[in-house]
Image (cartoon, rainbow, N blue to C red):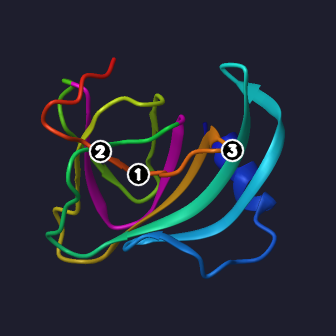
Amino acid sequence: MRTVLALAVVAILGASSARDHSDMKVFSARDIAEKLDGKDIRATTYEVTIEPSKESAPHRHPGPVFAYILEGEYEWGIKDQPVKRLKAGDTFYEPAMCLHRVSRNPGETVTRLLVVMLHPRDAEELVIPERPNDAHP
């Protein structure tokens, strides 16, 4: 997984100031030749910044996520798995459309994550808020 993240960092060819989410800074979004579940896909690389003691609401992503903790501490929980406490240098993977139920900074300093997501080119949202009645795999 570290190799994939390292390659993604090398692929960043200029930062964009585009924002898809209040704490998300997109660095690059490139169409790639491979397909995911038969669909044309894009690889988006972005940084997530989480202020101390803040968290995001439960959500999903339209494609697999690979992340590297650049700075700080991060509590992460998907599906019904136990919450994991990660630190700078750690990595994690989330399958497409799985429930990302815990995403928080438990520390007293900023947490920064470098994220690479593979998603359908026509995805309207990269962060899909979980609604109480949603039923997903």
Q: In this view, does 118 lie to the left or right of 48?
A: right
Q: Residue beneath label 2, please?
A: 59
Where is 55 relative to 60, above or below? below
Rounded to the nearest whole Å, what is the CA distance between mark 1 and mark 3?
14 Å
At mark 1, the secondary structure is loop
| Quarter assignment of residue 40 | top right
Q: What residue type is labelled 3?
A: Arg
Q: Residue beneath label 3, please?
A: 121
Where is 104 relative to 121, above or below? below
The residue that appears at 16% across and 62% down in the rendered structure is 106
Q: Which amino acid does label 1 sit on?
A: Val
Q: Is residue 25 left or right of residue 57?
A: right
Q: What stretch is highlighted in magenta?
A: 63-79
Residue 81 highlighted magenta (yes or no)? no
Mark sitting earlier along the chain (2/3): 2
In the image, 31 versus 10, the foreground residue is: 31
Where residue 63 sits: x, y (%)?
A: 54, 36
Residue 74 highlighted magenta (yes or no)? yes
Quarter of the figure with the C terminus: top left
Rounded to the nearest whole Å, what is the CA distance between mark 2 and mark 3?
19 Å
Where residue 37 sits: x, y (%)?
A: 65, 19
Mark 1, Cα crowd under 10 Å, few <14 / some 14-19 / many 20+, is some
At mark 2, the secondary structure is strand
Mark sitting earlier along the chain (1/3): 3
**For the residues bearing labels 1 and 2, Cβ distance under 8 angstroms:** yes
**For the residues bearing labels 1 and 3, Cβ distance under 8 angstroms:** no
